[in-house]
Image (cartoon, rainbow, N blue to C red):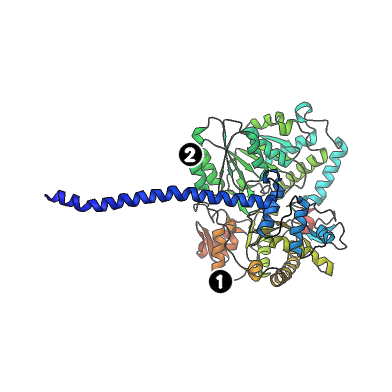
Amino acid sequence: MDSKSVQSAQSLPARLLSFLFLAIASLFLTVTKPVRVAKKKLEDYNMAMEIGKGQDYRDLTFLQLALRSVKLAEKLPIQPGESFLATCDDIAGNIMGTDDKALIKKYWPFAPGLDFDQLNDGVSVQVKGDDFKCTLLSSLSYWGFHVNQEVMDYAIARTREIGVGNHGSYLLLGKNQAVQEAYTNLAALFRRKHCAISASGFLGCMNLVFYLAPKGGVIFIDEKAHICLRFGTKVSGAKVVRFPHNNYNALAKLVAQHRHKYTGRALLVLDGIYSADGTIANLPRAREICDEHNVTLVMDEAHSLGSMGPTGRGIEEHFNMIGACDFICGVFSKSVASYGGFVVSNNQEVLDLNASPGVGFASGPHAFSAASVAKAVEIIMRDGHKVRPAMEQLRWYFIGQMYRAGAANILAIGHDTFISFPHTLAATAVAIALRRRGEEGKSAWLISSFMFPSVPIHRSILRITISPLITRDIIDEFCLALKDVLDELAQTRFNDYIMHGEYEMPTHQTDTKYVGAIEEFNSYDAIRKVRELRRQGVLSEPEKSHTGDIYLAEYGLRATETGVAPIDDLAADNIKSAMVTEASTPLPREIAA
């Protein structure tokens, strides 16, 4: 037998063993995969049966499904046929530790909702049924325009000239002069040629998405996009592809995989600020992907209008990329404190929206709302260079004070600051406790909280906002109250870890090319790095507030692709000299008027 035959004979057992191993592995995968799938289906079925309690879960409303899921997570019993309000009562009673229906109705913030009298200082409210006042520290009126004297005087004067209402739909009867003024000012703010306004912000954004992408097209949308945008995708008839939040590597792969299959228009739909997550869209990367694959970029600037960019012109100004978005949509209920929605673009299709269902078949804003928008936007363009730097400084001061109060998981972007808790109900418990302080004659606070389905099931957040109406004295007083509530709930309702402990917040896989340098401390990686430096004693708490890169430079640090890194003195001086510094302190209250 020659040497080749010998080698072949010797390798035969090895080949047989390899073949046998592959065969067993294939059989194992063939058998176990169906088992895993079946197990998952069984778990889903059991969960559906538990949530339904005799009802087909498909017959439940979205809100019923969501809150029954909360009860399931908290191991609270679900009664057959229980109503949405009954579910709310059970969850609220569990948070507050009471079965008193009157007390639950008084303090439960979600349903049926709160009624309050608003005082003319713009920050004080008295909830119906309370014998004490609260400071509202979650207002989305980011510039305080709801009590701005200049806005009120102008809107009242224009209403007296024009009247209070409209004659019918845009499509048949057109728009009044006040609405046209708002059109003109919004187009100028975003440096666009065309504008359309709808009666509702939700409707306007939803209408834009479904109008731009009919059947034959494809829509790529961030999984955390606002529900109005997601509703637009459902109505459109186009193929919808969701991608993991802020994961632009995943998005690029999905676009490459699906774009060529569809002859119609492709959309990429994003939020400027994701208002329940404290994150922002990665506009540079999004624009790259859109250019590479012929995709139209739609950006919702609901929360970023007025609260991002050096002068408040939104996410494009934040990234110094004016014109990068093909269509910008948004609402008037945030920075401009009015009612309605808008779309701006250089694309003439914006004019076609006047014949679309969500605009043409609905009456537009009345004269008072439209005039309020026109004047508020004019003020943003006039005063943004003063207000925005002052708000950035105030925000960083607020963050420092909240850390001192014992809050551990803080995210901040625009005029929003979020405290995140690793528990389904913790944030709502904190919000209720802050308001109930008024029963004892202490300072009381009305704060927004988010729970599932706005955030993941085992997480909850407080959203706290700033505006030119908020002073450092208000912040200091709130943080003292916050410390008392966190300490008390750590002892009586939860534990120290839930109230004060640092936990690993979700990592959104944004491309490292942009992390830190453009997202400031909104970057989770940067937050984790700063925590580490604090623990090592490299960083101490700031003695005064700072903004953006100045905050970093004070510690000899700079933003990098992975977080923060040391910086030399010359570079630090250059950063400081390049920033707007004329507003060294928060704006006095009277500037907001």
- The residue indicated by pointer 1 is 535
Q: Quadrant of residue 170?
A: top right
* Residue visible at 51% across and 36% down in the picture: 259
Measured from the top left, where is residue 93 in percent x and y? 77, 61
Q: Quadrant of residue 186?
A: top right
| Front-lying residue, 356 or 551 | 356
Residue count near mark 2 (Cα–Cα under 10 Å), binned few <14, some 14–19, many ≥20: few
Mark 2: amino acid: Gln
Q: In this rendering, would 119 be left or right of 141?
A: right
- The residue indicated by pointer 2 is 257
| Front-lying residue, 548 or 440 | 440
Measured from the top left, where is residue 451 in percent x and y? 68, 56
* Residue visible at 83% across and 69% down in the picture: 440
- Spot the residue most to the top: 172
Measured from the top left, where is residue 563 in percent x and y? 52, 60
Reply above or below: 177 against 3: above
Is residue 517 at least partly visible in the picture?
yes
Mark 1: amino acid: Arg
Q: Which comes sooner in the sequence, label 1 or label 2? A: 2
Reply above or below: 385 against 567: above
* Residue visible at 73% across and 36% down in the picture: 197
Q: For the residues marked 1 and 2, what is the alpha-carbon distance in whole angstroms?
A: 44 Å
At numbered mark 1, what does the secondary structure look like: helix, strand or loop? helix
Is residue 447 at least partly visible in the picture?
no
Residue count near mark 1 (Cα–Cα under 10 Å), binned few <14, some 14–19, many ≥20: few
Of the residues tagged 1 and 2, which is closer to the observer? 2
Measured from the top left, where is residue 164 in percent x and y? 86, 37
Q: Which mark is residue 96?
A: none
